[in-house]
Image (cartoon, helix red, strand yellow):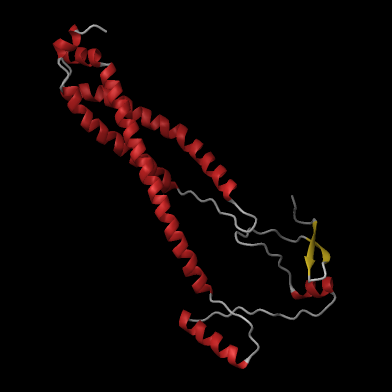
Amino acid sequence: DLSVGGTIVIGYGDQGKSVEVEIGYIFDNYIFHYAVMNSATYERLFGEEYTPTTVLVQTSSEESAYDFASTVSRIGSLKSWSATSESRRSFQETMNQLNLVVYLVIGCAALLAFIVLFNLNNINITERVREIATLKVLGFNRRETASYVMRENIILVCMGFIVGIPLGLALHRFVIAKIEMDMVTFDVQIFAQSYIFALGMVLLFSLVVDFFMRGKIDRIHMAEALKSIE
């Protein structure tokens, strides 16, 4: 609940010292917490000259970074060093492992969607045998009879997409908020192609199910279906 122009107390040192500073700007930082100030502000607040203890060096390659650190370690009082490229590679490997879990979840969700669509279509056709048989008797051809049933499935998929995507987005934000830690937070970014991919995948499943269900519609015997007692 802090804002620009307010104040915040920052603790420093091993003796539990603290200083109250004014907030000039608030920025998003997703790993750890940092307060940034220039040397003049540091000297005014802490009453001592600012002496840098860390330096950021940009090199042309990862190998030159190791060579540079090795050289400085021999000629100076360098206590420790780290290469951002190595940290980046380690983090990328972790994300690649996490992607495997994401692919597994997507695969399970896709299989579940396929099963649900198949069962819904099967139940829909089974419960409307007399209605479909009546359409055949009235002269509807194979394509018209199938589209009469399958058109409803496409409409239901689109309706489910309209309702489900906002609910999924809300659930996603809820889950991300729950797994955030004090030292690590996540930038939620869901791109438009993700929605397009989700809709396209479900529509594809619906078309595949409709293709298989056409055979069941073709096997409906008009006379037997109309003679059956509901």
> Where, quadrant-wise, is the C terminus in this rendering?
top left
Instruction: Give me the residue at 59% from left, 55% from top.
Output: 185
Q: Taking 214 as reference, is 21 left or right? A: right
Q: Taking 167 as reference, is 115 left or right? A: left
Instruction: Give me the residue at 22% from left, 24% from top.
Output: 146
Residue 180 lies, in percent from the top left, at 59, 51
Q: In this view, does 23 lie above or below 126?
A: below
Q: Taking 152 as reference, is 85 left or right? A: right
Within the image, what quadrant is residue 11 found in? bottom right
Residue 191 lies, in percent from the top left, at 46, 49
Q: Is residue 151 above or below residue 169?
A: above
Q: Taking 98 as reference, is 221 left or right? A: left
Residue 77 visible in image: yes
Q: Is residue 111 above or below residue 154?
A: below
Q: Is residue 71 above or below residue 9?
A: below
Instruction: Give me the residue at 74% from left, 49% from top.
Output: 1
Residue 61 visible in image: no
Residue 152 lies, in percent from the top left, at 32, 25
Q: Work out which residue is located at the far bottom of the displayed protein and give it.
A: 75
Q: How many numbered marks appear?
A: 0
Residue 123 lies, in percent from the top left, at 30, 22
Q: Front-most of 88 and 138? A: 88
Instruction: Give me the residue at 23% from left, 12% from top.
Output: 130
Within the image, what quadrant is residue 212 found in? top left
